[in-house]
Amino acid sequence: MEIRERRHRLSTKLYRGKIIITFTVCIAERYPLFAQENITRIFSDLLINILKKEECEAHVFLFMPDHFHVLVEGKSDESDLLKFIKNFKQKTGYWLGRNHPGIKWQKDFYDHVLRKDEDILKQVKYILNNPVRKGLAADSKGYPFKGSTVYNLEEW
């Protein structure tokens, strides 16, 4: 029996422009890929290149052992955040196929479009505290697999 992929629930129009969205993307079968610093560095570099190409900024990105969080903002009316996340998954998926056959992203992702009244810094702090809640770090400063194109997280 063939399993059909569900269509993403939001209209593609909602991902365009000067908006802010959080994305969570998981590795299939929860494989702990991002416990390896060299891989997170490669994925971080790919992420930053794709952000620039798609006219986006990452308020924060964070690699947990088996999944990835990013809070991304479109910087122009032409920004397409759905295109951004699909491009990121495609480029990193290609890299995985060449370097770690058998390890893949899950098919879809979780997303949340921030409302105008939602506090961005509260969302950033929530994401940064994921490793603390999971017992991977005593505080968010001590967790190495994170970054931002907006803030200097070392000053937090």
Image: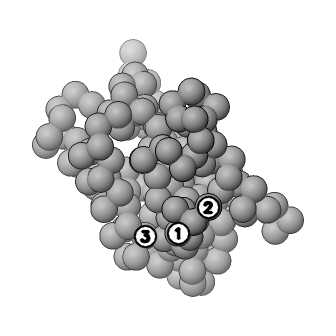
Residue at x 56% of width, y 70% of height: 151
User: Relative to the observer, which residue lies in front, 52 or 64?
Assistant: 64
Residue at x 57% of width, y 66% of height: 155
Residue receiving disc 2: 156
Distance from Cα at disc 3 to Cα at disc 2? 23 Å
User: Relative to the observer, which residue lies in front, 1 or 123?
Assistant: 123
Q: The C terminus appears in which quarter of the rendering?
A: bottom right
Q: Secondary structure at mark 3?
A: helix
Residue at x 62% of width, y 54% of height: 22
Q: Residue furthest right?
A: 117
Q: Residue furthest top?
A: 1
Distance from Cα at disc 1 to Cα at disc 2? 7 Å
Residues tagged 1 and 2 counted as in contact (Cβ below 8 A): yes
Q: Tell me which numbered mark, 3 or 2, is placed earlier along the sequence.
A: 3
Distance from Cα at disc 1 to Cα at disc 3? 17 Å
Q: Residue furthest left?
A: 98
The circle drawn on residue 152 is 1
Q: Is residue 41 left or right of residue 151?
A: left
Residues tagged 1 and 3 counted as in contact (Cβ below 8 A): no
Residue at x 36% of width, y 25% of height: 31
Residue receiving disc 3: 51
Q: Quadrant of residue 52?
A: bottom left
Colour scheme in the image? Answer: one colour
Q: Secondary structure at mark 2?
A: loop
Tell me: residue 115, above or below residue 42. Answer: below
Q: Is residue 115 left or right of residue 90?
A: right
The mark closer to the camera, 3 or 2, is 2
Q: Is residue 101 left or right of residue 77?
A: left
Q: Type of residue at label 1?
A: Asn
Q: Position of residue 61 (x, y in %)?
A: 50, 55
